[in-house]
Image (cartoon, rainbow, N blue to C red):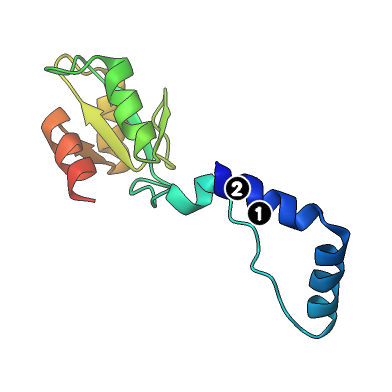
Amino acid sequence: TEIAQSVHQWFRVPANQALIDRLQTAGLQLAREVNSNEATSKPKPLSGKTFVITGTLPTLTRDEAKALIQNAGGKVTGSVSSKTNYVVVGEDAGSKLAKAEALGITQLSEAELQDLVASL
């Protein structure tokens, strides 16, 4: 914090501000500010992918599976449509599975979902 305070104080001095202005006028381009989230964020492997969860999963609750998908950048919806990319299928899956089959949507087990997230 001592260094940050020193830098802050340096930029507050009018003569130093004038120096920066002269350097910019001469063509110096200061680096743009980097958002801290931008610097530390990683690409999300499931960005742009839509998932539906149906049935009872073996080890994850529905909320845990939803969080796993969302943390990897995916979107979870409650109904199957032509925009759905994957259906995560558990035991006693119902009409969502039938609709996914009719639309030719890729089905994943809980283990396959976890493998997909881990591999990307």
Q: Residue 85 is drawn in which quadrant? A: top left
Query: Crowding at label 1, few (<14), some or many (≥20) Cα neighbours within 10 Å?
Result: few
Q: Position of residue 116 (x, y in %)?
A: 20, 44
Locate residue 31, reporting x and y percent: 64, 68
State whether residue 68 is above or below residue 117.
above
Q: Is residue 33 left or right of residue 58?
A: right
The residue lying toward the viewer, choosing from 30 and 83, is 30
Residue 40: give x, y in percent of width and height: 43, 49
Alpha-carbon distance for marks 1 and 2?
Answer: 5 Å
Residue 43 image point, x, y percent: 39, 52
Which residue is more in the foreground, 115 or 10?
10
- Residue at image x 21%, y 18%? 93
Instruction: Tell me which amino acid carries mark 1.
Output: Val
Above/below status of 77 relative to 15: above
Q: How many marks?
A: 2
Q: Residue furthest bottom?
A: 26
The residue tagged with tag 2: helix, strand or loop? helix
- Mark identifier at residue 4: 2
Q: Quadrant of the N terminus?
A: top right
Q: Are marks 1 and 2 in contact (CB under 8 Å)?
A: yes
Q: Amino acid at mark 2?
A: Ala
Q: Can you tell which quarter of the image residue 111 is in?
A: top left
Residue 7, numbered label: 1
Residue drawn at 73 percent across, 56 percent down? 10
In the displayed structure image, the side of residue 25 where residue 96 appears, left or right: left
Relative depth, front residue between 40 and 58: 40
Quarter where residue 21 is shown: bottom right
Label 1, secondary structure: give it.
helix
Side of 98 relative to 6 (left or right):
left
Using a 10 Å C-alpha cutoff, classify the residue at mark 2 as few (fewer than 14 neighbours), some (14 to 19) or many (20 or more): few
